[in-house]
Image: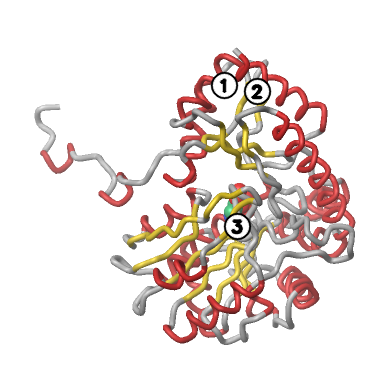
Amino acid sequence: MNDVSPIARDLHARAAVRALVASEIREVANAGLGDPDILAFWFGEPDEVTPAYIRDAAVASINAGETFYTQNFGIPELRDAIATYVSRLHRPIASSKVAVTASGMSALMLTIEALVEPGDRVVCVTPLWPNLTEIPKILGADVVRVALEFGRTGWTLDVERLLSALTPGTRAVMINSPNNPTGWTIPREAQQTILEHCRRHGIWIVADDVYERLYYATAGKDMTCAPSFLDLADPDERLVSVNSFSKAWLMTGWRLGWIAAPPALMPDLGKLIEYNTSCSPVFVQRAGVVAIRDGEPTVLHTLERFRAARDFLVAELSRIEGVHAALPSGAMYVFFRVDGVTDSLAFCKRLVREAQLGLAPGSAFGPEGQGFVRWCFAAGQDRLAEGVRRLEAFLDR
Ligand SMILES: Cc1ncc(COP(=O)(O)O)c(C=O)c1O
């Protein structure tokens, strides 16, 4: 090694990348590695296999020899199907303003790559899935956090506090609603106020709408959906909505999502897609067409199942002394506080080793989550009940 130059010896990534946080959820999962008896609720993943009619569409595409690149923005059939869906759910949108992406995660990365420069100020409503807060940092932006508050009725946003953080010159605000991890869903009036403020100051709104169909307030009706900035903003405004097939259509492993953006952004988004993934796999896109066109019963079935799971888990947790859980209005997590827990990571590691229960530490979602624990309730009632039993037994010791 002596003949290697000091420059060649510096094999580290650049400073902004080295400074990214490592996933604390992974750290907890690693603590339980190799133990088959662990009951895990730490990852945000539905427990059911993608329905057969969606899988069949992908198989048929492969068997038909569809193994080639597609257009950067996706196949026209899928862009059209997404535009029809979004138009039905929110407001008319042309397929030319839809970009298909290889996952919601990729959609977020592309959006921030398109908008954010080193030194830009990006404001996030937190606690938040760390992928959202870390992406702007990869691009060298400064991330400012505005925390939700936890009370007896659940999580709330002090809109005035958010507005005062959205100073002139702020580049973007990232809002994930329904929110991972808290389930908080932004009220319509707050959206209107934030939109008007961002309009005045030229601030981009990046709306992570990945959980918009997992919204429990209007469950049971056709085409249920959380309030979206898309309902309020004009097509030419500084709003990018990011979405995914992962959750509502049970397609996490497929890696398929989309972006709805103003027309002026589209040519540059196209370049970024070319230089990232170039396109999503064509057979995955074919499955996406069928999912979004025919999948409404799947979405509604998933919503009802998760609603029952949510109600069950919150009722069970609320029975346990020292556990404080509120009913989340969206997404698929209960984010609860446990009396006496000051280090969520240490607590979750102990739960894994000593109770064989896998939960995600609240601190993985930022300092506001310290003392909290995230439980993904996308699971059957038997599993949830056994998980609660293990938690209760652990806390009783
Ligand atoms: C808030 C939020 N946004 C985006 C995503 C990305 O989903 P995917 O990359 O699976 O499409 C997730 C996944 O857990 C999420 O929780």
Point out residue 272 in the picture as x, y percentages from the top left corner. 47, 68
Q: Which mark is residue 104?
A: 3
Place of residue 277 in the rendered image (x, y in percent of width and height, measured from the top left):
53, 58
Rendered residue at 78%/71% (across/down): 85
- Callout in the foreground (1, 3): 1
Q: Residue at x 60, y 20 (%)?
A: 395
> What amino acid is found at the position of numbered circle 1 in the picture?
Leu
Mark toward the start of the polypeptide (2 vs 1): 1
360 lies above or below 117: above
Q: How is the image coloured?
A: secondary structure
User: Dot 2 corresponds to which residue?
Assistant: 391
Number of the front mark, 2 or 3: 2
The residue that label 1 is drawn on is: 351
Secondary structure of the residue carrying numbered label 3: helix
Residue at point 75%, 36% (across, down): 313
Q: Nearer the viewer, residue 339 or 30?
A: 339
Q: Position of residue 215 (x, y in %)?
A: 75, 57
Q: Residues within 10 Å of mark 1 (few under 14, many from 20)?
A: many
Q: Is residue 63 above or below residue 96?
A: above
In this view, the residue in front, 159 or 152, is: 152
User: Relative to 58, does residue 260 appear above or below in the rendering?
Assistant: below
Please tell me whether mark 2 sits on a helix, a strand or a loop: helix
Is 314 drawn above or below residue 120 in the view shown?
Answer: above
Q: Contact (CB < 8 A) between labels 2 and 1? A: yes
Is residue 246 at least partly visible in the picture?
Answer: no
| Relative side of 175 to 303, left or right | left
Q: Is mark 3 within 8 Å of ligand 1?
A: yes
**Residue type of the residue flagged with mark 3:** Gly
